[in-house]
Amino acid sequence: TGPLKDMTFSVPEGSGVRLIYQFTVELPAVSFRATGEKDGILDIDPKTGVLYLNGSLDWETKTSYNLQVESLDENGQKVNGPYTVIILVEDVNDNPPEFDQLKYTGVVRQNSRPGKPFMCVHATDRDDPSTPHAQLTYSILHHFPNPYPKMLFQINNVTGEISPSVTGSYYLDPQKQDSFTLVVSVKDMAGMSMNGFTSSADVFITVKESLWKAPSTIYIQENSTQKHPVNITQVHSNEPDVNYELFEKEKLPRLPFSVDQNGIIYVTEPLDREEKDTYSFFVIAKDKEGELVDKPLQIVVVVEDINDNPPVCQKALTVLEIQENEDVGSNIGTVSATDMDEKDTLNSRLQFKIESQVPAVPASNLFFIQQDTGVLQLISRSLNKQIASNYSLKVLVKDAGFQTICDVQIHVIDINDQIPIFEKSDYENVTLAEDLPVGTVILEIQATDADEPLTGSSYIIYEIKEGDPNKTFIIETDPKTNRGYVKINKALDFETTPVYNLLIHATNPEPLVTGVQYNSSSFTVFKVFLSNVDEAPVFSQEAYITEAFENVPVNTLLATVEAFDPEGDTDLQGVQMLQSQLQVQDMMYTSILLNFTDNAAQKSKAAFIINLKDVNDNPPRLAMSYIPFFCHPLVGGERTLIQATDDDEQRFYSTFTFSLKDDMNTRNNWEISKINSTHAYLSPRHTNFEEKVYSVPIIINDNGRPPLEAEINLEVNMCKCSSEKSCF
């Protein structure tokens, strides 16, 4: 209840007969009157002032009512008003959503992009769109058939757009299943209430073959004379209004292809198979936002060959050799040529033919060439190096449209049908002193060969076949003259071998022809006598090495050496010298020269090396060259660094220990603390020192074997210091 004034009320629709409000009477008013959009549903009781409904409101029919209410006196005259009273009808969820079609049909292409809509369903709700009552959510209830664990289709729950799922984009195939039925539902209350209304509709989907297909391999003949660009194929996207582009992965200097916005692909210039025989690139389709709408398609273009290249000789001049005794049919060699046209086609098939032979003696057709292989063969056994040593051939090489001349030169090689013959069958003997040096030439020998000079058939190799098992001698051949030089290869020794009976054989590196063999003419003999020479004694070792401690006593036996005389003389005299005392600090080793002399005063020498071993015979000492000092007066905490060393080998003084002399004065005034194996700190124990030089007795032990200890009086200066911390 309340006084009469402008008011607004909200009333839920469908609520039936009910009281809304009661206006109170204020004298002199005694009644009320309502006018306006009562529509037979709204009214006011004149006497009580009760505003009431006598029926149900319907938001879908009318959303608000506008009334004018005034108060009247006893005479029906207006006292207050009119005041505006507005009745707002509140919507309730009393309408289910409705699809705009009972059935929907759509078409989807194979391999369509997942998430790309190909159709849409739509539903409406008569409830207030500003409330959840009319907020609709779409979903797929059923999927017929559904051959995979995941659905092939998906729906946007807000827009109702239907698209292939990721699974569907991969598996949709009209050859396997060309139609599907979806049961699509729509629910109001944004799908969030159990009391919302739901409606459904059937969606019939037909799967069609994808338009987005890579064309078969495209074949383009090279060097085309057509006007370019030339249409070679076309691609079609499954979606409209797309932009087509080409790209390639090879990063070619240029791609001789283009595509227009209808998907037509062009070759933009003549192609050359010899430059590139295959092109592989990709065409893509993008939507207006620049996003790919389909997977890239690979385009493969094969450039077909035409016969546009002549044969080319592999060599400007092909040089071959043949022996003069070769059999008819023997292969001499191959004339090689190439053709840049496509391999294993008629365009690159080459055929060979001999056009001419110079000289044409003893016949004009000594040679034959296989037509399809270029293999040259001997067709006549008439070769004779004395008649003609070289032949020049002109070989015609042709393909289906071109031809080339290749030059061939054939050398006739002399056969090895002559053996080396020594000028002497016996070179008698020679006497040599056994001390001749290695490399000395002791004899020159000569054999001759009637085969062609400076060839493997005439070059002579001299070999000692018998009488020299240890290869004491070698024979070297002068390649220009075939003269042989017998040289000493190893040291001669009369005592071991006083006489050599040598059998020498002369041969060629090239095998002899069948029927020809080496005979006695290719052998010679030679005898070598050695004369004895008084040789110096020989030590059993070139050098003797031993070791000794540096304090070894004089006359100590260090080692035993041996020597012998090659002539068997046993009366050898030896001399040995040794210094009195060896010091490792002066040298780590010493070398002594040993001499042996035989009766003929022949001398030999050998080195005797003594590696000296250190002993711990040097006491520790201080390594400092300065006098430590402290600035007087002391303030406390001062210390100075001291360092010890030892003249013995490193391993004997790797660790020093430091201590103070065990007297009360030293102990009361100083302390020492080790830092590492060679250093320690010396520190005053108090600050009550006078300004003078103090002598501090320090004991250093080297911990060697045996350990050595040294007592050292270290002078320490207590002095006035400058600002640079040094004594005045």
Image (tube, rainbow, N blue to C red):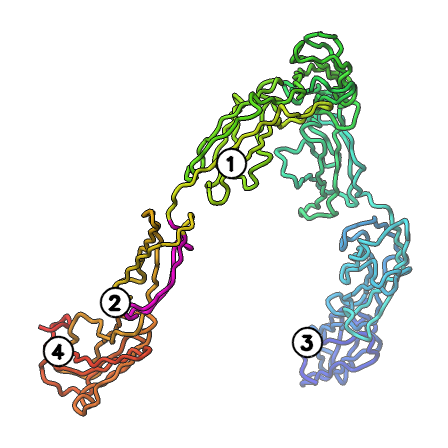
Name the magenta segment's main secondary structure.
loop
Of 478 and 112, which appears nearest the observer? 478
Residue 471's place in the image compared with 723, above or below, is: above
Is residue 48 highlighted in magenta?
no
Q: Amino acid at mark 1?
A: Phe
Q: Is residue 493 left or right of residue 256?
A: left
x, y percentage for residue 102? 90, 58
Mark 1 and mark 3: Cα distance apart in space: 142 Å
Residue 7 numbered tag: 3
CA neighbours of label 3 inside 10 A, class few (<14), some (14 to 19), many (20+):
few
| Residue underneath mark 2 | 581
- Sequence-wise, the earlier of marks 2 and 4 is 2
x, y percentage for residue 720? 10, 77
Q: Is residue 39 left or right of residue 649?
A: right
Q: In the structure shown, which secondary structural element does the residue marked by tag 3 occupy? A: strand
Q: Amino acid at mark 2?
A: Gln
- Sequence-wise, the earlier of marks 3 and 4 is 3
| Residue underneath mark 4 | 717
